[in-house]
Image: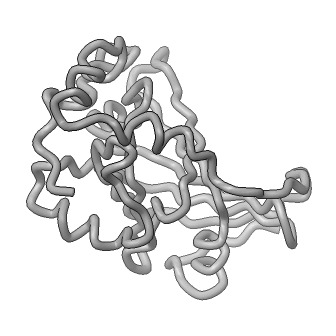
Amino acid sequence: MGKSYERIDGRLRTFIEAQPMFFTATAPLTGDGTINLSPKGLTGSFAVLDEQRVAYLDFAGSTAETIAHLRENGRITLMWCAFQGPPNIVRVHGSGEPVFRDDPRFAGLLAHFPDIDPSRHGLRAIIVVTAEHIRDSCGYGVPFMKYDEDRDLHGKRFAREDDESLSAYFAKKEHIAQSMDGLPGLPLPLPPSSV
């Protein structure tokens, strides 16, 4: 049976930090807007900041729907599910904020990710999520799957980009500066990276 939690600590924190991937879900306020659901991975790109806040690194990709939705309304749900071990699903429903590279908080937040080289992945922002509701559920329907390793393709693709070429890459993409529903997405050109 599902249970609610006041904070991200103990067994709950241990569980979410051990998962090799998680999912994010966001949506615009308009009733006919595009709901976005994204898998997230890459070892070292997620961190528990404290008992109420988590963060993950937002890397280069083909759209910026999560950023656009968070800029509009801040609503986000994160979900982890156990593909190995005892069945469990954890959801953090909360408010999220993209912290961009020119934000004074950026360097301090980046220090929470010592095990990943963000310069290899086209780091765009750090997404900070403040938990409002934390719940777990059984996960009986989630299959067993084996985690082998992270794919190295993302790092190989974006390691060759500098700030200028990355901004040019994003400018050519249809849904980076503006979401599929016309919301402001990633501010371009990207501010210079300090990493």
Given the current orientation, which residue lies at the most extreme bottom position? 10
**Number of callouts in the render?**
0
- 113 and 133: which is toward the camera: 113
- 143 and 43: which is toward the camera: 43
Q: Position of residue 112 (x, y in %)?
A: 34, 72
Q: Position of residue 119 (x, y in %)?
A: 31, 51
Q: Is residue 161 left or right of residue 140?
A: left
Kindly identify the residue that appears in the image at 28 percent across and 33 percent down.
Answer: 72
- The quadrant in which the C terminus is found is bottom left
Kindly identify the residue that appears in the image at 66 percent across and 65 percent down.
Answer: 19
- 135 and 102: which is toward the camera: 102
Q: Position of residue 85 (x, y in %)?
A: 86, 71
- The quadrant in which the N terminus is found is bottom right
Kindly identify the residue that appears in the image at 60 percent across and 87 percent down.
Answer: 10
Q: Is residue 139 left or right of residue 72?
A: right
Q: Is residue 5 left or right of residue 154?
A: right
Display coloring: one colour
Q: Quadrant of residue 131?
A: bottom left
**Is 87 above or below relative to 102?**
below
Q: Quadrant of residue 192?
A: top left
Kindly identify the residue that appears in the image at 43 percent across and 31 percent down.
Answer: 61
Q: Is residue 95 left or right of residue 147?
A: left
**Is 120 above or below relative to 169?**
below
**Is 79 above or below relative to 113?**
above
Q: Position of residue 68 (x, y in %)?
A: 32, 31
- 173 and 10: which is toward the camera: 173
